[in-house]
Amino acid sequence: MRGYNTGKVVIGCNYQPKRSYMDDLGIFWQGYLLGQKKSLLERFRAFCGGEL
């Protein structure tokens, strides 16, 4: 069962998460602008297409 049962209603039983509208490049720039640091290996994997 999904949701929280309060006894009268079930909160969140119809919730359906939405997909992210951002692509990999958008996520990269968001992390960069927010100052989130990645390791050299993570940056290299992202540069090569994510698979290594």
Image (spheres, rainbow, N blue to C red):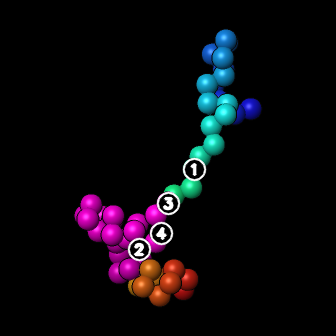
The answer to whether marks 1 and 4 mark residues whose Cβ atoms lie closer than 8 Å is no
**On the image, numbered disc 1 is attached to which residue?**
18
**On the image, numbered disc 3 is attached to which residue?**
21
**On the image, numbered disc 4 is attached to which residue?**
23
The answer to whether marks 3 and 4 mark residues whose Cβ atoms lie closer than 8 Å is no
Q: Is residue 9 above or below residue 43?
A: above
In the rendered image, is residue 47 in sight?
yes
Frontmost of labels 2 and 3 is 3
Mark toward the start of the polypeptide (1 vs 4): 1
Calculate the distance from the C-alpha at mark 1 to the C-alpha at mark 4: 14 Å
Q: Is residue 23 magenta?
A: yes
Residue at 57 percent of width and 50 percent of height: 18
Mark toward the start of the polypeptide (1 vs 2): 1
**On the image, numbered disc 2 is attached to which residue?**
25
Residue at 26 percent of width and 65 percent of height: 33
In the rendered image, is residue 41 in sight?
no
Calculate the distance from the C-alpha at mark 4 to the C-alpha at mark 2: 6 Å
Mark 1 residue crowding within 10 angstroms, few (<14) / some (14–19) / many (20+)? few
Q: Amino acid at mark 2?
A: Leu
Span highlighted in magenta in the image: 21-43
Mark 2 residue crowding within 10 angstroms, few (<14) / some (14–19) / many (20+)? few
- Magenta stretch secondary structure, dominant: helix
In the rendered image, residue 50, in percent from the top left (x then y), is placed at: 51, 80
